[in-house]
Image (cartoon, helix red, strand yellow):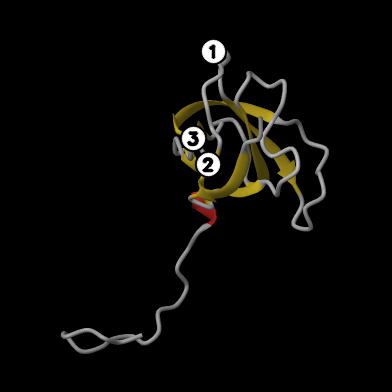
Amino acid sequence: YTASLHSGFPAGGPIGAGMALTLTGTGFVTLGTSVARCFFMPINADGSLTGGAELLAAANVASVTQALCDAPSAISGGLYRATLSLNGGYTRVPLYFSAVLFELYDPAGLAVETVSPPGGPLSGGTL
């Protein structure tokens, strides 16, 4: 049996906002009484592991091509590699495929510093 993971949406979101990650792929199934789970591994910008603990989250298999993962609320900002297990964590998707990247950020650190241009016509169209 082979399942593959193709993409995730959104690519990120604010910490603690109850984010859900939608994973898209093929071959997603519910395996009997096994519980689907998502794993989030903190990584560096170059894709290497940070050494931080892998975090577990609930997952719901919505269809053969889609699964929904709750982003763990306890994680700190940064880049995470997300994987999916259809059998409670014994094996994970992807075994041989690229993982989905998911970035969490602290919304308190966001600020608008400048706006350009400062105005435009009422009809719009200004970039």
* Callout 2 crowding tier (Cα within 10 Å): few <14, some 14–19, many ≥20: many
Left or right, 1 with reference to 24: right
Whether residue 105 can be seen here? no
Instruction: Please state which of the two labelled residues, at mark 1 or mark 2, is closer to the viewer.
Output: 1
Q: Nearer the viewer, residue 116 or 21?
A: 21
> Decide: marks 1, 3 in contact (CB < 8 A)?
no
| Mark 1 and mark 2: Cα distance apart in space | 33 Å
Q: Which residue is mark 3?
A: 67
Q: Nearer the viewer, residue 61 or 127?
A: 61
* Callout 3 crowding tier (Cα within 10 Å): few <14, some 14–19, many ≥20: many
Hey, what amino acid is under mark 2? Ile
Whether residue 108 can be seen here? yes
Residue 32 in the image, given as x and y percentages of width and height: 54, 13
Residue at 48 percent across and 50 percent down: it is 10
Left or right, 45 with reference to 114: right
Of the image marks 1 and 2, the number of the one nearer the N terminus: 2
Secondary structure category for the residue under label 1:
loop
Q: Which residue is mark 2?
A: 15
Residue 16 in the image, given as x and y percentages of width and height: 49, 36
Residue 123 in the image, given as x and y percentages of width and height: 16, 85
Report the disc number at residue 32.
Answer: 1
